[in-house]
Image (tube, rainbow, N blue to C red):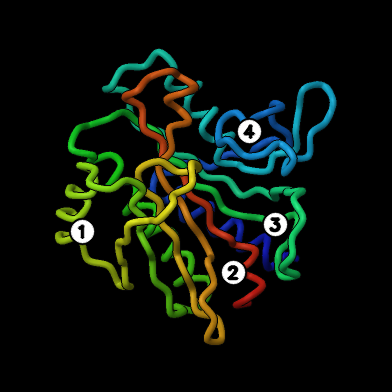
Amino acid sequence: TLAFKKLELRCLERASEQGVEPFTPSPIAPLGTCSAIARINQNNVVSATRGIEVTSDMTNVMAMKTAIAHSGAGRDFPALQFSATHRLVRTQPFDNPAYAAHFVILCLSSGGFDRGSFSFEIDQLFKHIRAHHDILSREAGKPKSYTVILLKKVDHPFNAFLEKRLAQEEFDYPVKVVQEENPTQYYDLVQFKTFTDFNGEEINTSDGGLTDWTQKLTPNKKHRFFSSGVGIELIHKLFQ
C-alpha cells in the first residue's frame, strides 16, 4: 500500500539524517551467500541457475558491500554505515500461521575497524538499539517495549566493558542484559532483541548483533561488523 511505502521512505530518511547511507539492493545474490557467510541452511533459500539465489538476508549482502569497500584499507579508514529496505524470501516451512514466506524489513549495518576496549562494538550496539526504538516510537505510537542484550560468551572481557558503559547510558525504555544459554552461531559475542507489547502479547519486532562475516571476507581480524533488522512490515500491520 501507499501508506507502507511512505513508512519505508521515512525509515530511510531518518537513517540518512544519522549519517547512514541508504542504497537499493538487488533482489538476487551470489549462490551460497547465506550458507557461506551466515551458515544458514541452503534449503531455506530460493536457489536459481547461473550461480545466484534470491536474497533472503540483506545483512549478508551488506557485509559483502562493506568488505569490498574496506578491502585493503587501514584502521584509520572511516566506518561505513548502510541502510536498505528489502522484501526477503524464505522457503522453510512454518507451523505458525502468523509467519510469512516473504516480508519487508529495514536493515542497518555498521562496518569499521577495532578501536580498542570494544568501543566500536558497544557504540554500534547502542546506536542500533536506539534506532529501533525510534522507529517504534514514531510508527507504532510509543508502545510499551524493551530490549534484551544477549551475551554469547561467559566471562568474556567484552561483558565487563559493556556493563561499565551501560552504567553511563540512559534509555527511555528498559534494557536488560542476560547470559544466553546455548547461543546460536549466527551472531558473535553479543546480540540484542527488541520486544513490543501488542494487546498484552510480547512480540519480537527487531534484532541485531555482531558477526565475524567481514573478517572472513576481507580477511582482516581487526574488522568489525554490526548489523540489525527491524520488522517494519510487521509493525505496520500491527499498529497501523
The disc, 4 or 2, on the residue closer to the chain's N-terminal end is 4
How far from the left and from the top, in percent, is residue 150? 37, 56
**Total label count?**
4
In front: mark 4 or mark 1? 4
**In whole angstroms, how far apart are the C-alphas of marks 4 and 3?**
20 Å
Q: Give the numbered dot on residue 235.
A: 2
The disc, 4 or 3, on the residue closer to the chain's N-terminal end is 4
Q: Is residue 149 left or right of residue 5?
A: left
In front: mark 1 or mark 2? 1
Q: Is residue 59 left or right of residue 194?
A: right
Q: Give the numbered dot on residue 35.
A: 4
The disc, 1 or 2, on the residue closer to the chain's N-terminal end is 1
* Amino acid at circle 4: Ser
The disc, 3 or 2, on the residue closer to the chain's N-terminal end is 3
How far from the left and from the top, in percent, is residue 20? 44, 43
Q: Secondary structure at mark 1?
A: helix
Q: Residues within 10 Å of mark 1 (few under 14, many from 20)?
A: some
